[in-house]
Image (cartoon, grey):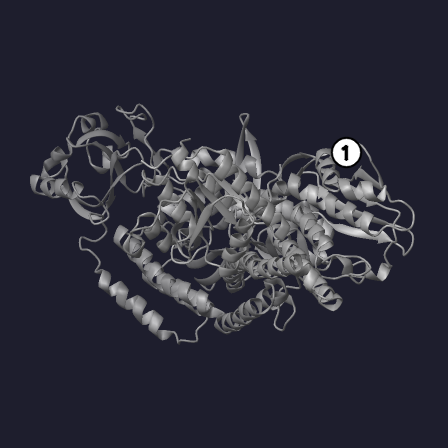
Amino acid sequence: MLIDSNQNDVNLTSLKEPVINLGNQIQNHGVLLVIQEPELNILQVSRNAAYILDCPLESLLEKNLEDLLDPYQIVRIKSRLAEDSLDFTNPTKIWVKKKREEYAVFDAVFHRNSEGILILELEPAISENNIPFLSFYHLAKASINKLQASASLQDYCQIIVETVRKVTEFDRVMLYKFNENNHGCVLAEDKLESMEPYLGLNFPESDIPKPARKMFLSNLIRLIPDASEESIDIFPQLNPITERPIDLTNSTLRSPYPCHIEYLHNMGVGGSLTISLIKEGRLWGLIACHHQTPKFVSYELRKACEFLGRMIFSEISTREETEDYDYRMKLTSIQSNLIDYMSQDDNFISGLIKHEPNLLDLTSAQGAVICFSGNYTLIGETPKEEELNDLVTWLQKNVNEEVFYTNSLPEIYPEAEKFKNIASGLLAIPIGKRNYVLWFRPEVIQTVNWGGNPNQAFEVNEEEGNLRLCPRKSFELWKQTVRLTSLPWKYVEIKAALELRKAIVNIVLRQAEELALLAADLERSNAELKKFAYVASHDLQEPLNQVANYVQLLEMRYQNALDEDASEFIGYVVGGVSLMQTLIDDVLAYSKVDMQGIEFAATSVEKALEKALNNLRRRIEQTGATITYDELPTVMADSIQLMQLFQNLIGNAIKFRSDKPPEIHIGVSRLEEEWLFSVKDNGIGIEPRFKERIFVIFQRLHTRDEYPGTGMGLAICKKIAECHRGNIWVESQLGEGSTFNFTIPLKGRESERRNGRKTQNNLFGRG
Amino acid sequence: MSVETEEKRKIIFLVEDNKADVRLIQEAFKNSSLSHEMLNVRDGIEAMAFLHREGEYHTAPRPDLILLDLNLPKKDGREVLAEIKTDSKLKRIPVIVLTTSQNEDDIFQSYDLHVNCYITKSRNISQLFKIVKRIEDFWLETVTLPREQ
């Protein structure tokens, strides 16, 4: 049966995982001993120990390590075992006593497994002397020195495979790199002329599945000297102390999974050595050495290859990062341009899109979107807003990283297939919770060369009712057309996006800080102004009162002594002073209406209105005004200010009455989020062009002879409405009466404040 | 009320910095039928010196009524009020705050400091004269004031 590789990952993993980790067989080229610490009793042995150590298994299990080694070695081993790391101990040459005082020399490797059990692995030593590490260092150094500074990543990889092949004499040495989809690609190869080349071919993820990858992360060198060798059992099978099979994950001798052996067979490999290349804790790639026939490599030589690999690889890492040096410099300069624009412009969004270079240039994307506070700013080719909405929701649920990128969005987010021509590739940076910058790349149809058909990488055979995986038999070139994929995002582009994220976060934070500072400044100057207005008007009153009082005293005392002119002049003084007193009172009243001073509470509008009417009682009586009102609700408001608002509006309605007796109606209707109140009169009306002007402080439409007043009343009304987060406006025609409307939010001011605060928190809510 | 005190001229102590206001209040009291004497100082420090009979005030009489403005130079009316009302020798003298301030804080604070009453000066002179008349009627004729001990 053939299975499709995209069909069931789960199945493959579940079939493979347990076997790789728990397999407790070893390869035949060495002996494994499980040892009890600190006594060093032998608990378990591999069955091949009987002939390699020339001693029956049963009697081996009765022995102590001291029975096998001479006291001098035992002392040395014991002191090594006492140290924290066994790395410095490995490998150790040891001489094992066989029968008749004969000794066999082994490379001994100690390790403790996941359960802390000591395991000793012995491989027959090929040479009695240690290979000097320095010679490998010189070899590696010489190889690197051959390369010029301008050499490419490719050249470096080539040097590695050539050098490794030189020292190990394998038939084929390849350097494998895993791409973002975990498929492996052969970057460099050195081999016998006669062999089929694998250079440039891709190998599907399933060739080295996840559990095997995990193993490569902890077991950096893996030798299979003879792929046709039989596996050896451990005796007894269960550890006498734990009563479980022994965990051999980090054992160097552990047997490969049969499927892997089969894979090697199908590839024509007799022996192999695999060296892991790790970068930032991730399996970057492998050096894979293949031999057509079995091949043993001594522990030291293996270690040396690992060292060599790592040494040159560290050069590769730097190289990989500097490879796109020019491009990176370009991006850096774009990035600093963008940061400048962002801080110069009013908001960072326009800074990112309105100039050259723009957001698109930073990652060589064809489209980009800034999603901020629920608004989308689009540039270039992007999905539609509804599509973006869904995508952002998906990102919120599925992405927690500071940066997310894929060159095949439809593969993980199937809805993206609709807009594959725009966004098969996505690079996203979250800024706060629902805010993102997204870059898009269109689908690019590519051809990938595979070593064998990746869709037929495995066969599943059914044997005795058990499913068994078998690797494919063909590794011939297989060309695949890849769809729903964009050009990949380069490391430098991703890094540039991350840098931009930092800058945006800083700018947004700074703008928020500036706003807060500005608000504090405003609050301060507002408070000062208020205080000033209060003090000034208060202090103005005193001298004014003085003038008023003495003029009145003059009038009182000398009424009979003054002529008509003098009385008239005194009349003007009294009138002017009294107007000024009213003005000051109104300015004081105006300065008292402010946000901080408002005391929100559930307020009966009817009660507030009745108080206002009571204050206006005399004028209502004098003018014969009729005042009617609807059933009035209870609202969240400051009762005194609401009363003042009604008093001013109704007072005006009476003041600006026509020839008819005033008829005033107070109406109310409930809108979606606010109450709409109206004060309708049958007065003289207002010309529409003065609609705005009347609400401006000190603005009047009439002379004081016609209508007395300071021009503060409606300004105070407006301020009261605004302090309640409501509005006020007038509907009127000259001669047809006026209707003053004002609104009060249903929930009062507090709820809006809370919402406002919440939005801000969301911005930086990300942990 | 003994015969002696009835005959005695009432001493009204006016603490007010503005000359014009002092004069106006004096004018208002001129209409009075009551025999009284009005004494005036123009800042808080002077006021306390007067009440404690310090320095040039060592012969100062004890006032029967204090009219106190709140905004005074050197030491303001609130401090003067607080000092009077915490001084065992002075606290029984009735103090009337007479000010233009209608500020609620001023009103609360004055009563907290045990002012006897708080009167806002009217801007209208006839109104002012009426107030002064009522002060006289009430504080100097109706109420029984404590005797100096």
Q: Is residue A251 visible?
A: yes
**Position of A282 relative to A79 (above/below):** below
Name which residue type carries label 1: Leu
Identify the secondary structure beneath mark 1: loop
* Quarter of the view holding residue A84: top left
Which residue of the protein is positioned furthest toward the left in this rendering?
Answer: A71
* Quarter of the view holding residue A613: top right
Total numbered labels placed on residues in the image: 1
Report whether A698 appears left or right of A163.
Answer: right
**Residue shown at 19% from the left, 55% from the top:** A130
Report whether A493 appears left or right of A87.
Answer: right
**Position of A17 relative to A387 (above/below):** above
* Quarter of the view holding residue A289: bottom left
Q: Is residue A478 visible?
A: no
Q: Determine which residue is flagged by label 1.
A: A632
Q: Position of residue B91 (x, y in %)?
A: 37, 39
Question: Could you say which is closer to the camera, residue B141 or residue A463?
Answer: B141
Q: Position of residue A223 (x, y in %)?
A: 35, 48
Question: Could you say which is closer to the camera, residue A702 or residue A759?
Answer: A702
Instruction: Please report, as a chain letter, where disc 1 is located.
Output: A
Question: Could you say which is closer to the camera, residue A486 or residue A721?
Answer: A721
Q: Position of residue A149 (x, y in %)?
A: 40, 75
Report whether A605 appears left or right of A361.
Answer: right
**Position of A278 relative to A355 (above/below):** above
Disc 1 packing (10 Å; few <14; some 14–19; many ≥20):
some
Question: Could you say which is closer to the camera, residue B122 or residue A383?
Answer: B122
**Residue shown at 22% from the left, 48% from the top:** A91
Report whether A675 appears left or right of B39.
Answer: right
Q: Position of residue A184 (x, y in %)?
A: 51, 54
**Quadrant where the N terminus of chain A is found in the figure:** top right
